[in-house]
Amino acid sequence: MLFMKRFRVPVRAMIMAVPACISMISCKVSDPVYSEGGKDLIAYTSSLMIPLSLYEPAAVTAAAMDVDSYLSMSDEDREDAETMFPDGIEVNRDGSVEAKGIAYLQPGGTRFGETGSRWTVKRPYFDLFGEYSGYCSVPYYEMVWTAECTGDNEWRLSVEMQDGPVPEASEAEAVVRYGGKDGAAGIFYVTVSGKRTDGGYMAAGNTGESPAAVRRISVSGDSYGEVSYVMQVSQGSFHVDFSRDGVMLNYCRAVFGRDGADYSVGSYD
């Protein structure tokens, strides 16, 4: 028997370059039960699984594209372009690049858009459901992404995280295609599967065969400089199944549109 409820939730932009301390319902994957009108599953999906699996691959790709563009410039042009990186950017002797507050990158001597190139992109990830959920200034994980260019404006990304303060692991595999500009926003089409485990529990999410459209919005101002990494999903869907020791328990599905996201949650009997 399947029990389901539906909810309408407005789209909220997530600032990926600067961690934001926000208040939310706490729900660990170790107890993925259907409760309180489905709010626990929605909170877990919208505030952990979607950022990890949808926002992050797009943000990693956007950061690498910016750094790649910066590295291809003359020294004179680089001075003008440094406003793209609010906290500064440093190119090290070994060729690695630190875009402070955004990512640490190892280009490996290749252009990011060159077919066959492999970049490593290291970013902090702030897990607000973890042991230190109220302390946003301390990264809960350090995410190390591998991005391989598989064709024109398309990359395959993968990440594994097993260094949290509690015994659990997260991973994701994504294909990201840059779709160009939509007005002032950059569009990234993301097809992804990801999972997070904790003991015998697992939350596994995916976009299916159809990609989700993730919009990158530029923000100007003293806080973030001329460019920051604000990501929001404007099209597509994301489905998460919760299970324990291989037994299906619950699900949460988000269907995105320009005006928000429709969430449906349910239990498997």
Image (spheres, rainbow, N blue to C red):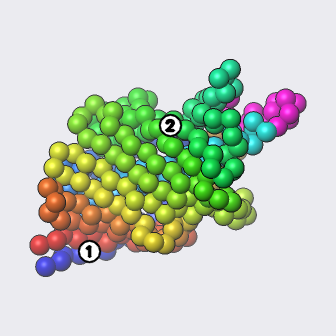
Q: Which quarter of the image is occupied by the N terminus?
A: bottom left
Q: Could you classify mark 2 by the number of other residues whose Cα lies within 10 Å: few (under 14), some (14-19), or many (20 or more)?
A: many
Residue 194 in view in this figure: yes
> Which segment did they paint magenta?
73-89
Residue 94's quadrant in the figure? top right
For the residues labelled 1 and 2, the Cα–Cα distance comes to 35 Å
Give the label, 1 or 2, closer to the camera. Answer: 2
Q: Which mark is residue 123?
A: 2
Q: Which mark is residue 5?
A: 1
- In-image side of 49 versus 99 (left or right): left
Towards the viewer: 120 or 196: 120
Rendering coords of residue 216 (x, y %):
62, 55
Residue at image location 41% in from the left, 29% down from the top? 138
User: Compared with residue 227, is residue 87 higher up or lower down, i.e. above or below?
Assistant: above
Considering every residue shown, the one lying at the far bottom of the view is: 1
Q: Is residue 129 magenta?
A: no
Considering every residue shown, the one lying at the far right of the view is: 76
Residue at image location 68% in from the left, 35% down from the top? 109
Rendering coords of residue 61 (x, y %):
59, 49
Towards the viewer: 82 or 211: 211
Towards the viewer: 92 or 127: 92
Towards the viewer: 1 or 115: 115
User: Compared with residue 101, is residue 157 higher up or lower down, i.e. above or below?
Assistant: below
Q: Amino acid at mark 2?
A: Arg
